[in-house]
Image: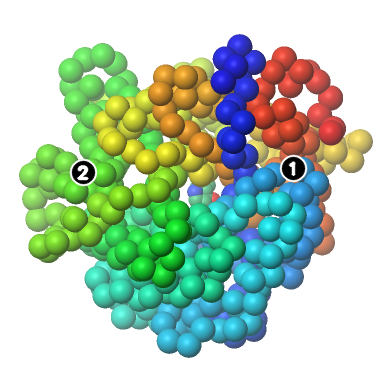
Amino acid sequence: MNNSKYLFPRDFRWGAATAAYQIEGAWNEDGKGESIWDRFSHTPGKIAGAHTGDVACNHYHRSSEDVGLMRELGIGNYRFSISWPRVLPTGKGHPNEKGIDFYERLIDDLLESGIEPFVTLYHWDLPQTLQDTGGWLNRDVGHYFADYSAAMVKRFGDRVKFWTTINEPWVVAHLGFRTGEMAPGIQDEKTCLQVLHNLLLAHGRAVVAIRAADSSAQCGIVNILFPEEPATNTSEDIDAAEFAWQKDCAWIMDPLFKATYPAIWDSMGDKVPDVRAGDLSLIAQQLDFFGVNYYFRCIMSATSGRILEIPGAQYTDMGWEVHAPGIRNLLTRITEDYRLPPLYITENGAAYKDELSGDGRIHDTQRIKYIRDHLIEIHQAMVQGADVRGYFYWSLMDNFEWAHGFDKRFGLIHVDYETLHRKLKDSAHWYSRVIRRNGLDEVLSLKQPMVV
Ligand code: IFM
């Protein structure tokens, strides 16, 4: 690694990420079953602007154009998810061949374009029929998940090497079952912690099933992590930050990498989940990689909880603080605390109000600065010992940002939701140059022209 210029190891993987429900559309075409996100977005009052993923970016019908754009940009790795109800409409039983065909074509297109597929098996669109039997609160759903995972690996394992079981179990459990802002919209903390346990169990079962289907599969899980910082250096604030870390991050990392729950278990009273003999060893499967999604840090005060307004801070259009050093702190902490497999930054990105300017381009300089600053911090973390093997920008294209609908634009590629026309933003051209140079150097300063 060349430190002064922030160049990355030669085999570092540069990529971009998406998820099925956020881009595909075609919600009820070609035999696809209903998902909990179809149900949730069709329920009045759940999504800003009453938006739905019914059409989204219509990627289901435009995937070759999207792969073509990635090829043009030199993006060598693409992280996407399979929609479980598209391939197994009721979550189990007979596969829907037309749904399978879509992913066959996508994967073949990617490989022909020299792009490595990184497949996520669960990015939140649970088949509604499984929700009707209790969804993730029902431990048995994990068995169906393992069967579905093995079926996908049998179909695609000759071409797909990298398999992620679950994207962000924290979000699935906390926003889907505690705050209720995401599908299925339940608000109960005890349920949330049971769901989290069941998700980790489902992950463990899926890893076993994937390896039985293809012993050469590379298996991992992706989680969102928030570095927690004390508001002041008083012992109370330091304790508050540490408690938050244990509750949000260690609560997932400890079972995965230490086969135990953290000591704060004892303070959770009757909210703790039902954990049965053998669960923890099933969860703690040896993994081939761990995916880190980083967006923001949390600043904790013992008296006022999480501080949302930080003097002098900059925020994205999501209201999330821009704090690049957080990714370095996070990577160095988890590297110290756990024996980890290789790491990928599987998501990192920012939503801004991107507008078409008079010259017909989208000058998203803030996004370029965001990516640049985070890459510098990742590079520093690697110098300090974090074993990071790749970076996936979130997201390849503007898409359906869950409860926020389409107004929050994270993409390198702008999508006009009226015409579905795609347009490369300045950040896409800039990222393309980063990829071609394998990192940042003085030529890639913000002042340089952005067009490739
Ligand atoms: O859009 C989401 C993605 O689906 C999961 N991680 C966070 C992103 C931004 O909110």
Classify residue 3 as left or right of residue 211.
Answer: right
Left or right relative to 56: residue 190: left
> Looking at the rendering, in which quadrant would you find the N terminus?
top right
400 w.r.t. 130: above or below: above
For label 2, count other residues whose C-alpha is less than 10 Å away and answer few (under 14), some (14-19) or many (20+).
some
**Residue at 52% from the left image edge and 43% from the top image edge:** 347
Q: Residue under label 1, please give it.
A: 74
Whether ligand 1 has any atom under 8 Å from the Cβ at mark 1 is answered as: no
Q: Which mark is residue 101?
A: none
Q: Are marks 2 and 1 in contact (CB under 8 Å)?
A: no
Looking at the rendering, which quadrant does residue 363 occupy? Answer: top right
Please tell me which residue is depicted at 29% across the width and 36% down the height of the picture: 339
Q: Sort mark 1 into few (<14), some (14-19) or many (20+) by Cα contacts within 10 Å.
A: many
Q: Secondary structure at mark 2?
A: helix
Please say whether residue 93 is visible from this viewpoint.
Answer: yes
Amino acid at the residue labelled 2: Lys
Total labels: the figure holds 2
Nearer the observer, 147 or 225: 147
Q: What colour scheme governs how the chains and residues are painted in the rendered image of this protein? A: rainbow
Q: x, y percentage for residue 399?
A: 64, 55
- Helix, strand or loop at mark 1: loop
Q: Quadrant of residue 371?
A: top right
Q: Which residue appears farthest toward the right when viewing the image?
A: 359
Residue type beneath disc 1: Gly
At 62% from the left and 44% from the top, the residue drawn is 15
**Mark 2 or mark 1: which comes first in sequence?**
1
Q: Is residue 371 above or below residue 312?
A: below
Q: Decide if ligand 1 comes within 8 Å of the CB at mark 2.
A: no
Instruction: Quickly name the residue at label 2.
Output: 258
Q: Whole-percent x and y of residue 158?
A: 56, 66
Image position, residue 259 (x, y; %): 19, 48
